[in-house]
Image (cartoon, rainbow, N blue to C red):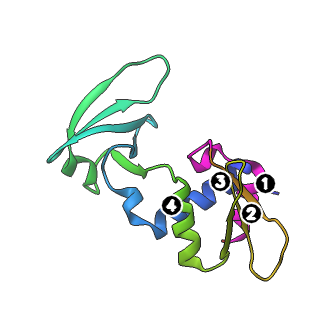
Amino acid sequence: MKTKEQKLQAVVADIRAKLPRLMELEKGCKISTVYSRIHEVVDEHKDLVKINLLSEKTDYTSMLEKYVIEDNNSPYKIIGKEPMLNDVLEWIEKGKSANTFNINSRGAIFMEFSATSGYCGMWDLSKPYLHQQSEELINFLYELL
């Protein structure tokens, strides 16, 4: 039995594979180093990106050339941007798995299969990123893989 985190990672990997724009080196993109440190692109200027180390204890900022990160032999690996609601809806549309979306008055989007009338998943609109959503929704999306 897979955990919520394992299912989330599988869904996110599939979303990033199907939506290559999430892997572009621009603001919000995460990268890692060979030392397993995670950085986030916080700004970009032509061929340069400004990255911050994502750590509670360190306030480290660095400027890197994009080609250095994109090089296959680079010590950096592009992780990608965190999927948001629009990315998940686009991913679902590409897979044509779920095609009924209802927005309710309480600030949520219900996702269900057209073949069934039952409720299958709900996106809490107060939380924009996929990793912030409920285990129920992650399970629903995982079943679409």
Location of mark 4 (residue): 87
Separation of marks 1 and 2 at Cα, in angstroms: 6 Å
Mark on residue 136?
1
Say what amino acid the circle numbered 3 marks. Answer: Leu
Q: Position of residue 98 (x, y in %)?
A: 67, 75
Separation of marks 4 and 2 at Cα, in angstroms: 16 Å
When asked about the image quadrant of residue 7, the answer is: bottom right
Q: Secondary structure at mark 1?
A: helix
Tell me: residue 115, above or below residue 130. Answer: below
Instruction: Write the start and end of the magenta stretch as one range.
Output: 126-144
Say what amino acid the circle numbered 4 marks. Answer: Asp
Location of mark 3 (residue): 8
Quadrant the N terminus occupies: bottom right
In this rendering, which labeled residue sits more in front, label 2 or label 3? 2
Asked if the residue under mark 2 is in contact with the one under mark 1, i.e. CB atoms within 8 Å, the reply is yes
When asked about the image quadrant of residue 91, the answer is: bottom right
Magenta run includes residue 42: no
Q: Secondary structure at mark 2?
A: helix
Q: Earlier in the sequence, mark 1 or mark 4?
A: 4
Separation of marks 3 and 1 at Cα, in angstroms: 11 Å
Separation of marks 4 and 3 at Cα, in angstroms: 14 Å
Instruction: Work out whether residue 72 or residue 41 is closer to the camera in this orientation and state it.
Output: 41
Q: Position of residue 113 (x, y in %)?
A: 75, 76
Residue found farthest to the right: 118
Q: Residue at x 19, y 51 (%)?
A: 67
Asked if the residue under mark 4 is in contact with the one under mark 1, i.e. CB atoms within 8 Å, the reply is no
Residue found farthest to the left: 46
